[in-house]
Image (cartoon, rainbow, N blue to C red):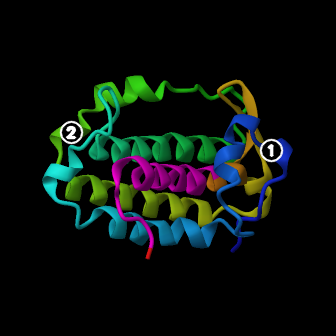
């Protein structure tokens, strides 16, 4: 099973910044690897660092991870609906409202890591069982056309984007 790179017209241009972070020609391997990459970056972070915000009004480390997990869920729902042939336009979501209402700072970082891992593993399972026709199927999400396989690349790129932000703005050691 392979999730091949989407063509540029298979996703909104606003998501190019995520798809561009995935040079691989198969999204499945990086989807699987990211569980350990995220755990390696955040697993040993002390509790006081998990609450760190690099500026007032910015998300804490825990909120960043919670946002990545919430977005993963939204992306997965969209991918499943589109792969199954949904013709209705799927709604967008306001990330800052979701973050403000999620309460991720109430949870231990380890619990948030376990949640990300569970969500990602479920998504890898779902995506790996889609055939080529389902992966190439295009639907509408947030008013724009997008294919199921493009969403898989967006998942990888979105997590990579936030790992880069954690490294750059939060001083989290990412990668080895």
Range of magenta residues: 154-175
Q: Which of marks 2 and 1 precedes in the sequence?
A: 1
Is residue 168 magenta-colored? yes
State the residue at coordinates (75%, 41%).
11
Name the magenta segment's main secondary structure.
helix
Q: Indicate the position of residue 107 as horizontal and vertical percent values.
A: 18, 45
From the viewer's perspective, is residue 28 above or below residue 123? below
> In the rendered view of the protein, which quadrant contains the N terminus?
bottom right
> In the rendered view of the protein, which quadrant contains the C terminus?
bottom left
Q: Is residue 161 visible?
A: yes
Q: Which mark is residue 10?
A: 1
State the residue at coordinates (72%, 44%).
16
From the viewer's perspective, is residue 159 above or below residue 2? above
Q: Indicate the position of residue 54 as horizontal and vertical percent values.
A: 32, 39
- Mark 1 is surrounded, within 10 Å at the Cα level, by few (under 14), some (14 to 19) or many (20 or more) other residues, namely many
Q: Is residue 84 visible?
A: no
Residue at image mark 2: 105
Q: Nearer the viewer, residue 64 or 132?
A: 64
Is residue 80 magenta-colored? no
Measured in 3D between alpha carbons, the distance from the residue under mark 1 to the one under mark 2, in whole angstroms, is 35 Å
- Mark 2 is surrounded, within 10 Å at the Cα level, by few (under 14), some (14 to 19) or many (20 or more) other residues, namely some
Side (left or right) of 36 relative to 110? right
Side (left or right) of 130 relative to 158? right
């Amino acid at each position: 099973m392979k999730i091949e790179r989407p063509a540029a017209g298979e996703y909104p241009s606003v998501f190019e910044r995520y798809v561009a972070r995935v040079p691989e020609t198969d999204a499945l391997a990086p989807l699987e690897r990211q569980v350990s990459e995220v755990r390696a970056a955040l697993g040993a972070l002390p509790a006081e660092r998990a609450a760190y915000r690099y500026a007032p009004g910015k998300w804490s480390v825990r909120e960043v991870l919670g946002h990545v997990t919430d977005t993963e869920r939204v992306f997965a729902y969209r991918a499943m609906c589109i792969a199954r042939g949904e013709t209705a336009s799927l709604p967008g979501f306001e990330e800052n409202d979701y973050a403000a209402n999620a309460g991720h700072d109430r949870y231990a970082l380890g619990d948030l890591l376990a949640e990300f891992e569970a969500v990602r593993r479920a998504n890898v399972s779902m995506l790996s069982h889609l055939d080529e026709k389902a992966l190439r199927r295009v639907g509408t999400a947030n008013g724009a056309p997008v294919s199921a396989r493009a969403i898989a690349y967006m998942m990888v790129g979105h997590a990579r984007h936030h790992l880069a932000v954690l490294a750059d703005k939060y001083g989290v050691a990412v990668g080895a």
